[in-house]
Amino acid sequence: MELSIALMLGLATCTMVLALFNQQLTFLNLFKAQNFLTDEAPIISMHVSRLVGKADRFRLHDSVGDALTGANPRTTASPVVVLNFRQPDGSMRATILSFENRGSGPALYYYIVPTTGVLGAPQWAITKSPSNVVFSMVQGILRMTLTGPRGEQIIYSGTMQQ
């Protein structure tokens, strides 16, 4: 009788420990999903909105090659956007935001287009966390749709400076 009671108490304890462990795993998964939304997404928003807010105009493209040459501009959703900035001397300078895979997984990259027109490596990887980034134009407003690593979707909108 005493052995049966001890065995039942041991099984009840094991059941409670497994339930607590399962609950901790669930909380950890929720934390990871919220971590992208609360920590990284606002930083991405800040950087992209600063760039877009200072741009004089933009153009959507399907590839970095098309963006560099100005070929095949699009009005549909695209992984690449060219932002043009007016310099103090009146000339224009371009940068490219591109969501692409450069061999180490997909990332949102920032390029400064040199005056020579020969594009090298990106100056900066803004983020490597999203599973997809798409730029689109809605009634003349640039929109960036960011899909997070767990399928969450955030849409940022910005206008050019006037």
Image (cartoon, helix red, strand yellow):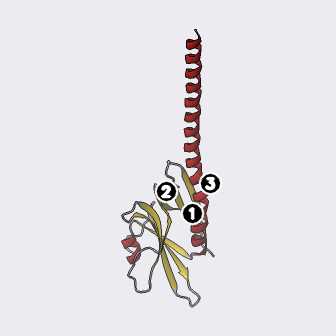
Residue extending furthest toward the front: 2
Residue extending furthest toward the bottom: 89
Residue ID for mark 2: 130
Identify the residue shown where x is 59% and y is 41%: 27
Instruction: Give the percent coordinates (x, y) of residue 128.
Output: 48, 61
Mark carried by residue 44:
1
| Quadrant of the drawing holding the N terminus | top right
SS of the residue under disc 3:
helix
Instruction: Give the percent coordinates (x, y) of residue 48.
Output: 56, 67
Amino acid type of the residue that numbered disc 1 sits on in the rendered structure: Ile
Amino acid type of the residue that numbered disc 3 sits on in the rendered structure: Thr
Q: CA distance from mark 3 to mark 1?
A: 11 Å
Task: Reply above or below: 127 against 88.
Answer: above
Instruction: Give the percent coordinates (x, y) of residue 64.
Output: 39, 70
Identify the residue shown where x is 61% and y is 60%: 42
Lower position in the chain sequence, tag 3 or tag 2? 3
Identify the residue shown where x is 59% and y is 19%: 9
